[in-house]
Image (cartoon, grey):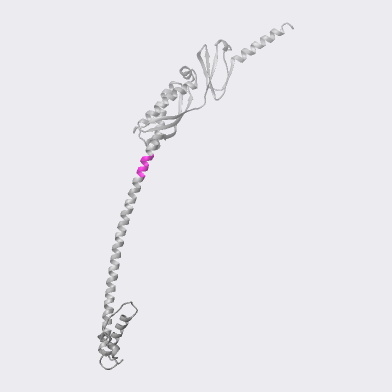
């Protein structure tokens, strides 16, 4: 009995090894491709515990695990040209999943890296075609959503040939290249300067109209004021002359005396004016005779 124990232990180890080699587990995030001598014999897409031939070291049955989740592939700094000849730098990403593991294994040997290399080439070409049919403003407008749909539609046949399903395509960034940015800035600056000059010209024109209207109103107001002042001055002069005439008619000698005194006041006040007159001048008649040559003082 003791001689059989080592043999039983060896047999138990072989059984455990064979059992371990024949079991594989697929979780909810995975799919399994069962290969026998390099050929696909089965695909397990549901989570669970499965069995296979335990001779993997002899390439009898082998299991390749592939992802069953939605995967993301980024494409950065793609230089695309729009219909007007200008260039954009585009960042985009692609969401996909492995829908047909058999086709995926046959097309790219089950390699995600190889599949994404092919997707990169096709997506780059699709972006260039979609942008190339549009003008400069399209990628920065609401038309961007339609552009993403077009890129996805162009990618789907190629993705299907790789066993993949396109879930979504998104354009994350669309920027002008450095040289186009400078050209755009210069153009916008020129437009703003032209608009500013138009506004200044309209302002100058409006100011000139306002100034002309104001000058005309000033001339009219001044002319009207002068007219009224002349009328008032004429009325005052007339009233003054009437008063003088009335005073002269009542007492001509006093009126003559008053006017002479007013003339003396205006002529002899401190104005710095030098007057050379003869003592016998008529101007000084009231200095020689209070009656002004009549022999009598004026009566009030």
Q: What residue is at 64 percent from the left and 13 percent from the top? A: 16
Which residue sits at x=27%, y=74%? 230
Magenta span of residues: 185-192
Residue 118: image location, x then y, percent: 44, 22
Image quadrant in which the C terminus is located = bottom left
Confirm whether the magenta stretch covers residue 189: yes
Estimate the x, y position of residue 279 in percent, counting from the top left: 27, 86
In depth, the one of 233 and 255 nearer the eye is 255
| Whether residue 137 is situated above or below residue 39 in the rendered picture | below
Give the farthest residue toward the right.
2
Question: Residue 83: which quarter of the image?
Answer: top left
- In the image, taking residue 250 as reference, residue 177 lies left or right, namely right
Residue 93 vs 17, above or below: the answer is: below
Vertical comparison of 95 with 277: above or below: above
Which residue is drawn at the image coordinates 36% and 30% (left, top)?
132
141 vs 201, nearest the viewer: 201
Give the quadrant of residue 81: top left
Q: Is residue 10 left or right of residue 144?
A: right
Question: Which image quarter is the N terminus in?
Answer: top right
Task: Pinpoint residue 97: horizontal percent, then vertical percent.
Answer: 49, 25
Residue at the location (51% across, 16% down)?
42
Relative to 296, 89 lies left or right: right
Q: Is residue 114 magenta?
A: no
Residue 102 on image: x %, y %: 48, 18
Asked whether 241 or 69 is in front, the reply is: 241
């Amino acid at each position: 009995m003791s001689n059989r124990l080592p043999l039983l232990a060896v047999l138990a180890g072989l059984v455990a090894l064979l059992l371990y080699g024949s079991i594989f587990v697929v979780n909810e995030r995975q799919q399994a491709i069962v290969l026998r001598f390099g050929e696909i014999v089965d695909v397990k897409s549901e989570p669970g515990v499965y069995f296979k031939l335990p001779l993997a070291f002899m390439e009898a049955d082998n299991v390749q695990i592939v992802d069953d989740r939605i995967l993301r592939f980024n494409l950065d700094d793609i230089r695309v040209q729009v219909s007007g000849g200008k260039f954009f730098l585009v960042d985009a990403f692609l969401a996909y999943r492995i829908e047909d593991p058999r086709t995926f294994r046959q097309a790219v040997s089950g390699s995600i890296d190889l599949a994404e290399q092919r997707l990169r080439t096709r997506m780059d070409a699709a972006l260039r075609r979609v942008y190339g049919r549009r003008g400069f403003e399209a990628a920065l407008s609401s038309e961007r959503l339609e552009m993403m749909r077009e890129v996805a539609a162009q990618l789907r046949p190629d993705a299907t040939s790789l066993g993949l399903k396109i879930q979504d395509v998104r354009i994350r960034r669309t920027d002008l290249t450095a040289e186009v940015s400078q050209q755009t800035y210069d153009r916008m600056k020129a437009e703003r300067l032209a608009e500013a000059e138009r506004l200044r010209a309209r302002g100058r024109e409006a100011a000139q109209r306002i100034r002309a209207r104001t000058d005309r109103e000033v001339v009219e107001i001044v002319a009207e004021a002068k007219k009224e002042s002349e009328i008032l001055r004429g009325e005052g002069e007339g009233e003054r002359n009437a008063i003088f005439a009335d005073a002269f008619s009542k007492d001509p000698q006093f009126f003559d005396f008053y006017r002479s005194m007013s003339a003396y006041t205006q002529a002899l006040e401190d104005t710095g004016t030098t007057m050379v007159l003869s003592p016998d001048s008529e101007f000084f008649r009231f200095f020689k005779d209070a009656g002004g040559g009549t022999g009598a003082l004026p009566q009030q």
